Amino acid sequence: MKRDIEEIIEIPEGIELSLNNFEIIVKSKGKESKKAFVLPNTIKIVKDNKILKLIAKNSTKRESKLIGTTVAHIENMINGMNEEFEYKLEICNVHFPMNVKVEGNRMIIKNFLGEKVDRIAKILPGVKVEVKGNKVDITSHNREAAGQTAANVETATKVRGRDRRIFQDGIFLTEKCGRKI
């Protein structure tokens, strides 16, 4: 069943939002976040003063889902300007003590399971990574970049070719955006 959909996002004070076709740029307090959305021609994004509208006339279920996802992304961009998103990971080692350090835009994991070759996890731009003992804190105003960096760190310490019940070493996600896992 087709219907008209109009979603409204209010832009808070102190946040500057600009629209260029389907690219949205959010700025505040020296921070900037931009994202280009790929939407069909039936969905229109309109900005009026402090209100952003996503409008779809005679939309289908697919377009309704796209609008909901786009609204969630834009709200995350706006929320990231006020408070940073934080991911917490824990370094667990049973067999060999591993050394973890941050160098520039990458995290280097030495002596993982006694391996001679270092494992490297990429840190995306705009993401701050701190290693404190066996805890790793990842913070950023961009939720997607912080989450992808946390995933990169977890993937870098994935155990391959061994029994996971015995080799439980790695760096694991324990908390994301204030939610314990």
Image: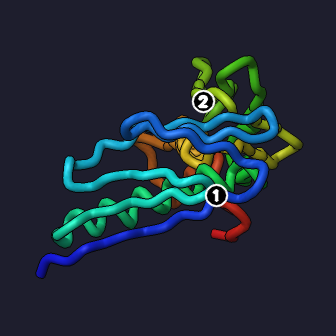
Query: Camera-side residue: 14 or 83?
Result: 14
The residue depicted at 64 percent of the width and 57 percent of the height is 11
Residue sticking out furthest to the left: 1
On the rendered image, what quadrant is the C terminus found in? bottom right
10 Å neighbourhood of mark 1: few (<14), some, or many (≥20)?
A: some
Q: In the displayed structure, does residue 106 sit left or right of residue 63?
A: right
Q: Do the residues labelled 1 and 2 touch (CB within 8 Å)?
A: no
The residue depicted at 33 percent of the width and 62 percent of the height is 55
Q: Which of marks 1 and 2 is nearer the N terminus?
A: 1
10 Å neighbourhood of mark 2: few (<14), some, or many (≥20)?
A: some
Residue 148 higher or lower than 125, as above or below: below
Amino acid under label 2? Leu
The residue depicted at 41 percent of the width and 56 percent of the height is 70
Q: Mark 2 points at which residue?
A: 124
Amino acid under label 1? Ile
Residue 111 higher or lower than 10, as above or below: above
Residue 139: x %, y % from top left: 74, 44
